[in-house]
Image (cartoon, rainbow, N blue to C red):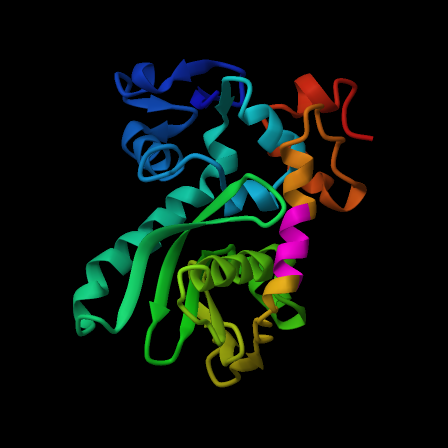
């Protein structure tokens, strides 16, 4: 069953069709809500699983395939920021000569040992350098954390995109992740200006994104997907992943009726 509408912090719900008749809902203008909708449920999404669903909570992915549900726009607002980046990519494709890049294109690949097709939309692939580039938005206060390590989910997501591309015969030897904050942009594996102070700027190198071999990726995917497609409901996520629970539409009704432990 699909995502069918939005829910406010006060518990009010509207279907998507009802929402477009309003000027505002959940503190956001309807134009922004519509853009979130387009980036969430509309578009060329085939049957199967998306990379995002695979990397998230197995229980949420399981329930979202069976039950209609509403999302709070506050918790998926990052998709609005991300949509702005994707608009830039679409508009700047004309800078490149034909046949030099692949951009904003969705591919899918069957996960070995399962009947599940996994799909992902590639931000950009440079054909000459065999380089996959992925774009992420982040809050300014998280920039310094990039110096310590790249977010694990971002590394896996980029490598799964690599695996999907290579299923189409498109080799990937390099992966770059571009992080777009409100103040500036930063790229994995490069020295970046972290604190632009007048007279005393601070520079630091962002760790490179590792490129995993396909057997490692397939083993990771098999264990992720088997929890999502099982006949019974998957268990709740472990303590290291429970930071995602407060934003989940199923957390209070199917996981933590008495509150997070």
**From the viewer's perspective, is residue 224 above or below residue 179?**
above
State the image quarter where residue 124 is shown: bottom left
> 97 and 220: which one is in front?
220
- Residue at 33%, 34% in the rendered image: 42
**From the viewer's perspective, is residue 98 above or below residue 219?**
below
State whether residue 89 appears in this view: yes
State whether residue 184 appears in this view: no
- Residue at 46%, 80% in the rendered image: 198
- Residue at 55%, 80% in the rendered image: 202
What predominant SS class does the magenta segment belong to?
helix
- Residue at 53%, 23% in the rendered image: 9
In magenta stretch: residue 176: no
> 33 and 27: which one is in front?
33
- Residue 29 drawn at (x, y percent): 32, 30
- Quarter of the rendering occupied by the C terminus: top right
**From the viewer's perspective, is residue 176 above or below residue 87?**
below
- Residue 240 drawn at (x, y percent): 77, 46
- Residue 112 drawn at (x, y percent): 59, 50
- Residue 119 drawn at (x, y percent): 45, 46
Identity of the residue furthest to the bottom in this view = 199
Q: How many marks?
A: 0
> 166 and 102: which one is in front?
166
> 185 and 165: which one is in front?
165
Please provide the residue range marked out in magenta.
216-222
């Amino acid at each position: 069953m699909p995502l069918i509408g939005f829910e406010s912090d006060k518990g009010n719900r509207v279907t998507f069709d009802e929402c477009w008749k309003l000027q505002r809902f959940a503190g956001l203008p309807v134009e922004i809500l519509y853009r979130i909708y387009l980036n969430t449920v509309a578009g060329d999404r085939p049957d199967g699983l998306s990379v995002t669903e695979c990397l998230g909570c197995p229980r949420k992915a399981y329930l979202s395939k069976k039950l209609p549900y509403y999302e709070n726009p506050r918790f998926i607002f990052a998709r609005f920021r991300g949509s702005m980046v994707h608009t830039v990519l679409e508009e700047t494709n004309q800078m490149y000569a034909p046949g030099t890049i692949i951009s904003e294109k969705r591919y899918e690949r069957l996960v070995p040992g399962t009947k599940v097709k996994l799909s992902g939309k590639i931000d950009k692939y440079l054909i000459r350098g065999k380089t996959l580039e992925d774009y992420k938005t982040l809050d300014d206060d998280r920039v310094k954390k990039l110096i310590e390590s790249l977010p694990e989910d971002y590394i896996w997501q980029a490598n799964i995109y690599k695996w999907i591309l290579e299923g189409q015969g498109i080799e990937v030897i390099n992966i770059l992740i571009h992080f777009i904050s409100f103040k500036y942009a930063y790229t994995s594996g490069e020295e970046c200006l972290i604190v632009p102070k007048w007279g005393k700027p601070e520079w630091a190198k962002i760790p490179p994104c590792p490129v995993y071999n396909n057997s490692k990726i397939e083993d990771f995917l098999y264990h992720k997907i088997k929890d999502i497609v099982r006949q019974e409901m998957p268990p709740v996520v472990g303590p290291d992943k429970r930071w995602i629970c407060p934003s989940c539409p199923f957390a209070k009704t199917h996981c933590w009726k008495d509150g997070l432990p």
